[in-house]
Amino acid sequence: MKKNQLNFRFVILAIISVFLFFASFQHIYAQGAKKNNVRLKANYVKIMNNEVYFDLKAGSRIDKKNVDIANIELLISNEFYDEEIKLGSVTTNMNGECRFVIKDINTLKPDSTNTFNIVVSFKGNDKFKRASKSISFKDAQIKAELITKDSINYIRAKLLDTSKDSLISDTPLTVQVQRLFQPLYIGEEFYLTDENGIIIVPIEEGIPGVNGILTFEVVLNDNEYYGTVKAIVIAPIGTLIEDESTFDERKMWSPRNKTPLFLLIFPNLLILGMWGLIVYLIINLFKISKSKI
Amino acid sequence: MKNYDTLLNDLIPRKFGKRGTIWTVFLILIIVVGLIAYIDQVNKGQVVTNMRDYALWGIYISNFVFFVATSFVGSVTVAVLRLTNNDWRTPIVRIAEIISLAAIVMAGITIMIDMARPDRLLHLFIYARLQSPITWDVIIVPTSIVLSFLLLYFPLLPDLAILKKYHQKSKPNFSKWYGKLALNWTGSKIQKSIQTKSIKIIALMIIPVGILLQTIDAWLFSTTYRVGWDSTNMGAYFISGAFVAGVGALVTLMYIIRKVRKLEDYITEFHFDKLGKYLALACLTYLYFNVNEYLIPIFTAPVQEDIHLNTLISGEYAPLFWFAQIVGLILPLIILIFKKGRKPLSMFIVGLMVVVGSWWKRYIIVTPTLLHPFLPIEGVPESWHHYFPSMHEWLITAATLAMALLIITVLVRYLPVIPIQRTFDEQELLKTKKTTES
């Protein structure tokens, strides 16, 4: 009996030792594994009268190939003198991309030169080293409107530095119309703002739009000081195109709540007819059972 | 002409001998192995199969189509022969009904096996879209199962009452069960009238339901815009194919049961001859649709269809394609033309050829098409360009086939494979006729 107990203790001890040995070995291995560098990209985008966001991307170069890093958490904070104010965090998708949205730019704190300093950081994990990326930008505004002169429509846009309340001249702005896949550029590739920070771009006739509505965008694209700023003007000046979408109609490819009526009526009649007869046949089985004589 | 006791003694279900027991254990073993593979598939997901982004339907679906096709035998033999007053059908109808039920039950189970998440089975009903052929299939398969069961059950009632009486002294437990299933059948006028009326309704219903089942099965493919499936021929093509598969399965099983149960006096050469002609008609019809299905696209095919046809006729799938066409269709047809070819043994061989050919034919219909999409296959590993079932798929499919055979085996063990009461009534009628004539 005593010998058996000793054997049992020995076996348990041996199992625990083996487990601990391999656990520590794993730990050593994890420590020794080579970690890869992380490259972070951050773009600041401001939509006038709407939200402000940062488009972030995490990548790495592994085995001479560029790889997107999915499912890592990026921390976003606002640098204010020596203080770092945490704004939040966001996780990358399968393409290594994510977007961090700020509802109001006034929640960010600028430094003495009215520059906003944002730090995007990754604290590292088993596979990747820690990394960070800083971006700085000033707040700019685009005031855009549609004007008509001699029956010709123009987009007029003014670019301003919000902090100084001054005009920004000699800066390229792009005018485009929103389209499903790629925007449609209007006129030149870009227009430089004049000494008053203004561009005036004529709109050619005949641009088609659903219900005649065109959505123009005036864009300051990836500017060194101001990032990307976009103003949107919605105008009913397009050539009317009929929306041929059958989305709201009862079609064969619609969801179940929009089944064509003939498909609701005839198959259901058929199903009811068939199952009605089946129920009748089952009742007949009961009738047979009840009528012995 | 046999008296009632001899007839009863011949047709009453018997306990299995050694061979029967070995056969049953063998089937159960295959089912157990398949079940283990299936549990593993549910645990790990469909990744254990070789189905991937392109070959998203594989051996499970072709097996399902085979079962659906085989179940058509109930409609084409029982109902059609009944409605056309072919009295020679009596010894073969129950075998056809048993095959029909086993095949359609297994079709239902096979489609569930193909679903990666069987726990979401109810979603097929809750979120059903009547525009989807999948929904039509979900409706028609249970309908067919119920109807096939009723087709077997109603004519069985008098025989179950006979079995109850027969086993009353020797096996009281058996007798009790047969009595319960016989639903107090006494053969009264009212009971006979209700039974006759019900069988007539089922015989009338099973034909359109059978045709609907086959057609919906075909529409699962033809409503999907793909090379090889995009055909208006598909519904009729599937019906004629099911005609062949069903009758092929029937003659094969008929031969085995006749031999094992020594029923040569009941299932005679005459029956094989008749069914041989019937099968020849089925093969001829199917051959006609095959010519339509493959010959016309050879003339009119766009590039993708041409690639697909070449793979079938002279490429990767050529051995299987020609096996299904020649062994499964053309050779049987040639054999069946001759009277000697319609003798029991040759009919058994023909039946086997037809059934095996039919199974591979479904594989040929399903897989090559999926590997020839209209847009080129890009951005996937090389192995995804091809499909051959994994071990899991083979084991599970073998288990479904074994399960169908087990259902048939169990039903053959406990039910009279030839209707006792009806055979006796027919003999009595014949006797009366002869007496009147003399």
Image: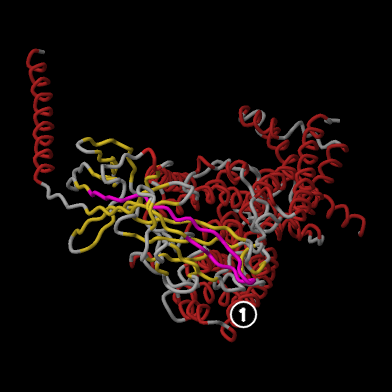
Q: Please identify the quadrant where the N terminus of chain B is shown.
A: bottom right
> Is B224 rendered above or below residue A87?
below
The magenta segment is: A133-157
A284 magenta-colored:
no
Q: Position of residue A115 (x, y in %)?
A: 29, 47
Instruction: Report crowding for label 1: few under 14, some 14 to 19, many 20 or more residues within 10 A (C-alpha).
Output: few
Which quarter of the picture shows residue A236? bottom right
Residue B6 visible, this orientation: no
> Is A100 rendered above or below residue B273?
above
Q: Is residue B175 left or right of residue B373?
A: right
> Is A52 rendered above or below residue A195?
above
A142 magenta-colored:
yes
Q: Is residue A141 left or right of residue A87?
A: right
Q: Nearer the viewer, residue B28 or A166?
A: A166
Q: Position of residue B197 (x, y in %)?
A: 84, 46
Which subunit holds the residue at mark 1? B
Q: Nearer the viewer, residue A267 or B320?
A: A267
Residue depicted at 48% across the width and 70% down the height: A185
Residue at the extreme top of the image, as rendered: A2
Which quarter of the picture shows residue B379? bottom left
Which quarter of the picture shows residue B87? bottom right
Residue depicted at 65% across the width and 64% down the height: A212
Q: Is residue B83 left or right of residue A59?
A: right
Residue depicted at 92% across the width and 56% down the height: B436
Q: Position of residue A5 (x, y in %)?
A: 11, 16
Q: Please identify the quadrant where the C terminus of chain B is shown.
A: bottom right
> Is A280 rendered above or below residue B332?
above
- Residue at which label 1 appears: B291
